[in-house]
Amino acid sequence: QVSSTIFKDGTSGMMLYIIFWCNTFFFSEIFIARDDVVLPFRLGFYLSPFRSALTAFTYLDYHGTQVECGEGVSLFTTATGGECSGSFSGDKVLDIAGNLFTPSATSDVDVLWC
């Protein structure tokens, strides 16, 4: 809504909003790790609300849970080299997913409760 008040033309405000949304999604660390981006553009990772929200929501979903191994191909068989036995804690699942897929999944998160 704020972007629509900056310009008199509604199309320009809508384009500004789409550019903002795409940039925050790009800098959410889903596709590209923060350390792989050159320093001037790394500021976008610190300003992206998607990055903070995605990390916190993923942590809150998996922290304090236990995940059992299942049959067939899964995250655990890929991470352990084809053998999965027992159960994994939610923090271990986050660390495995962070190493294999996306750096935004990690068990090292400080979540602020209001």
Image (tube, rainbow, N blue to C red):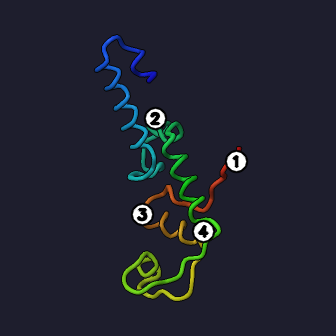
State the CA–CA distance, disc 3 to disc 1: 27 Å
The circle on residue 113 is 1
The circle on residue 79 is none
| Residue annotated with mark 2 | 40
| Residue annotated with mark 4 | 91
Q: Residues within 10 Å of mark 3 (few under 14, many from 20)?
A: few
Amino acid at circle 2: Pro
Q: Quadrant of the N terminus?
A: top left
State the CA–CA distance, disc 3 to disc 4: 15 Å
| Residue annotated with mark 3 | 101
Q: Secondary structure at mark 4?
A: helix
Toward the viewer: 20 or 37?
20
Q: Residues within 10 Å of mark 4 (few under 14, many from 20)?
A: some
Toward the viewer: 39 or 15?
15
Is 33 situated above or below 87?
above
Q: Quadrant of the C terminus?
A: top right
| Cβ atoms at labels 1 and 2 below 8 Å apart | no
Tell me where residue 50 appears, x and y as whole percent.
48, 44
- The residue positioned 49% from the left and 63% from the top of the image is 98
Q: Secondary structure at mark 1?
A: loop
State the CA–CA distance, disc 2 to disc 3: 25 Å
Q: Nearer the viewer, mark 1 or mark 2?
A: 1
Amino acid at circle 4: Asp
Number of on-image labels: 4
Q: Earlier in the sequence, mark 1 or mark 4?
A: 4
Q: Quadrant of residue 64?
A: bottom right
